[in-house]
Image (spheres, rainbow, N blue to C red):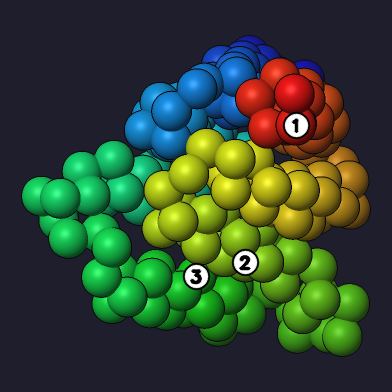
């Protein structure tokens, strides 16, 4: 492993810390803020590791978080934002096989769809603007990314998703269970 790879993995660990910690926030804006910072660092890490699609999707996720954190300013509750982000995710998926040259096989089309499913789930949860919903939709997003990361052997991202799932369950228990 080169120094460059170590730095890329270190940036991924910083991203992981923000994403895991996000599920312990009490308000949706704080959850989204932590995920925005994590998304930015994951984007950098994925680009450094040559995982272009992961980098693009995480850059979109960071931008998406800014919109949903400033809901009133950007009218984030408007359905067009959801449509806009979903179009960006689909475009990223298409670019994977066209511009970035990923071979279009049945397995690749399914594997590359997983992070799109994850991003779709988290985008819907941000639009709902409820910390519990973000945690519940995380139960779709994290497993999608986890499977994708296992297939691509992205060790830091695998650890992040496993810990995120634990954090989601802890957050659900702390804040969302019936008392």
Foreground pick, 61 / 4: 61
Q: What number is the disc on residue 178?
A: 1
Lower position in the chain sequence, tag 1 or tag 3:
3
Tell me how far mark 1 sits from mark 2, CA to CA.
32 Å
Label 1 Cα neighbours within 10 Å, binned few <14 / some 14-19 / many ≥20:
few
User: For the point 77% across and 80% down, which residue is it?
Assistant: 109
* Horizontal side, residue 63 vs residue 24: left or right: left
Q: What number is the disc on residue 116?
A: 2
Foreground pick, 73 / 60: 73
Foreground pick, 14 / 153: 14
Residue 11 appears in view: no
* Horizontal side, residue 28 vs residue 108: left or right: left
Label 2 Cα neighbours within 10 Å, binned few <14 / some 14-19 / many ≥20:
many
Q: Position of residue 125 (x, y in %)?
A: 52, 54
Q: Secondary structure at mark 1?
A: loop
User: For the point 74% across and 65% down, which residue is it?
Assistant: 114
Lower position in the chain sequence, tag 1 or tag 2:
2
Quadrant for the C terminus, please.
top right
Label 3 Cα neighbours within 10 Å, binned few <14 / some 14-19 / many ≥20:
many
Q: Which residue is mark 3?
A: 89
Marks 3/2 in contact by CB < 8 Å: the verdict is yes
Tell me how far mark 1 sits from mark 3, CA to CA.
35 Å
Above or below: residue 103 compared with residue 138: below
Marks 1/2 in contact by CB < 8 Å: the verdict is no
Residue 28, located in which quarter of the rendered image? top left
């Amino acid at each position: 492993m080169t120094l460059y790879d170590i730095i890329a993995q270190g940036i991924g660990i910083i991203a992981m810390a923000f994403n895991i910690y996000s599920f312990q926030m009490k308000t949706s804006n704080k959850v989204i803020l932590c995920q925005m910072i994590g998304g930015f660092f994951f984007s950098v890490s994925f680009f450094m590791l040559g995982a272009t699609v992961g980098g693009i999707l995480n850059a979109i996720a960071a931008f998406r978080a800014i919109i949903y954190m400033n809901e009133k300013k950007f009218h984030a509750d408007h359905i067009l934002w959801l449509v806009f982000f979903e179009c960006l995710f689909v475009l990223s998926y298409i670019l994977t096989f066209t511009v970035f040259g990923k071979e279009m096989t049945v397995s690749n089309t399914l594997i590359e769809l997983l992070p799109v499913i994850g991003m779709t789930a988290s985008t819907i949860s941000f639009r709902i603007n409820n910390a519990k919903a973000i945690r519940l939709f995380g139960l779709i997003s994290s497993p999608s990314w986890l499977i994708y990361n296992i297939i691509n052997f992205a060790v830091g991202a695998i650890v992040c998703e496993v810990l995120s799932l634990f954090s989601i369950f802890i957050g659900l228990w702390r804040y969302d269970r019936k008392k």
